[in-house]
Image (tube, rainbow, N blue to C red):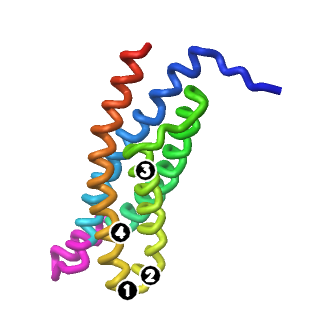
């Protein structure tokens, strides 16, 4: 039995992945802000520390990071699925490979959480380094993704 997908669904489904990824890029920047606040809290003294603790930045950073992990993995798979459904193949190129790399980076970064919760500085530094690379790739992906969307729109 072949699944028949209406043409209108195939056309509009191509915009789910890029829309989701732009939202995730914004959330990633927010997670960066929260991570910076966690670091500030860790190194603050006295009243400033008490004030920063009230912000619960560590809890928010962990929660936002968890949502990012799940949405990025689902969004990456969805992007590949829609591309395959619409074209019968994946286009192996820099955008796909960098996206797969980003998915691996966010998984590796999130896997360091138990070590960071136990105060392991090596895990914290690795987490930060992985996420700096991830954010850089994400910015580049946003640009190349817009180029891909422009090609899709011009072919409609």
Q: Position of residue 46 (x, y in %)?
A: 16, 81
Q: Disc 1 designates what residue?
A: 120
Q: Nearer the viewer, residue 45 or 95?
A: 95
Q: Position of residue 101 (x, y in %)?
A: 42, 57
Which of marks 1 and 4 precedes in the sequence?
4
**Residue 58 has which mark?**
4
Q: Which label sits in the foreground, 4 or 1?
A: 1
* Most distant residue in the right direction: 1
Q: Disc 2 designates what residue?
A: 115
The image shows residue 100, relative to residue 150, as above or below, that is: below
Which of marks 3 and 2 precedes in the sequence?
3
Which of marks 1 and 2 precedes in the sequence?
2
Which quadrant is the N terminus positioned in? top right
Helix, strand or loop for disc 1:
loop
The image shows residue 153, relative to residue 108, as above or below, that is: above
**Residue 97 has which mark?**
3
Which of marks 3 and 1 precedes in the sequence?
3
Q: Are marks 2 and 1 in contact (CB under 8 Å)?
A: yes
Which quadrant is the C terminus positioned in? top left
The image shows residue 156, relative to residue 86, as above or below, that is: above
Q: Which label sits in the foreground, 2 or 3?
A: 3
* Residue displayed at 48% across by 71% down: 111
- For label 2, the crowd category at 10 Å Cα-Cα, with few meaning under 14, some 14 to 19 and many 20 or more, is few
Asked whether the viewer can see residue 113, the reply is: yes
* Residue displayed at 43% across by 38% down: 20
Q: Residue 81 colored magenta?
A: no
Which of marks 3 and 4 precedes in the sequence?
4
Question: Which region shows up in magenta?
Answer: 39-55
Q: From mark 4 to mark 1, how far is it between C-alphas?
A: 15 Å
């Amino acid at each position: 039995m072949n699944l028949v997908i209406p043409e209108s669904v195939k056309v509009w489904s191509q915009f789910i992945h890029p829309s989701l990824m732009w939202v995730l890029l914004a959330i990633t920047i927010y997670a960066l802000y929260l991570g910076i606040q966690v670091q500030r809290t860790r190194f603050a003294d006295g009243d400033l520390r008490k004030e920063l603790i009230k912000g619960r930045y560590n809890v928010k950073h962990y929660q936002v990071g968890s949502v990012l992990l799940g949405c990025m993995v689902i969004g990456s798979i969805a992007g590949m699925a829609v591309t395959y459904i619409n074209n019968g193949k994946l286009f192996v190129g820099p955008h796909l490979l960098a996206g797969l790399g980003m998915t691996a980076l966010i998984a590796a970064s999130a896997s360091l959480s138990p070590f960071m919760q136990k105060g392991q500085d090596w895990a914290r530094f690795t987490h930060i380094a992985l996420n700096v690379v991830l954010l850089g790739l994400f910015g580049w992906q946003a640009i190349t993704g817009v180029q891909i969307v422009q090609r899709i729109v011009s072919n409609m």
